[in-house]
Amino acid sequence: MSADMIKVAVATDDGITSDVNFGRANRFVLAEISGGRIKREGEVITESQSPDIDNPGCHGHDKEYIEGLVKKLNECSYLIVKHIGNFPFRILKSNGINVLEQTGDIDELLGKIAAYTAR
């Protein structure tokens, strides 16, 4: 990965918008930003159900799940989500992934990151 290239992951349920909380996302869109150009690189599909009986459908408190996801997103500098709790935020941050809580069209959000990082 070149010095001016960054990778971004976006939590989504529809592949079009950042519209879901971290622990409930069924997928993460991956994109690469380089020289102001944005290229979608694919997706990371997540498990559909949490093993947490007290919080079914949410992986936000499952350390093993979060650490596994960190391995899949290890090249990403940024993660965009609708909302994230403190526990997964700390794990992601300690692994070098900056978390941004934003909602909206994925391409528009990626454009904002491209403009921000080009400064």
Image (tube, rainbow, N blue to C red):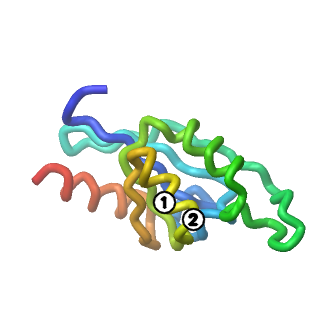
Tags 1 and 2 in contact by the CB under 8 Å rule? yes
Residue 101 left/right relative to 111: right
Nearest to the observer: residue 21 or residue 111: 21
Q: Residue at x 63, y 61 (%)?
A: 14
* Mark 2: amino acid: Phe
* Mark 1: amino acid: Arg
Identify residue for label 2: 87
Q: Residue at x 36, y 39 (%)?
A: 32
Q: Residue at x 53, y 73 (%)?
A: 83
Residue 55 left/right relative to 86: right
Secondary element type, mark 1? helix
Residue 21 left/right relative to 119: right
Q: Residue at x 28, y 57 (%)?
A: 113
Give the percent coordinates (x, y) of residue 22: 59, 63
Give the percent coordinates (x, y) of residue 88: 56, 60
Within 10 Å of disc 2 (Cα), the crowding (few <14, some 14-19, many 20+) is: few
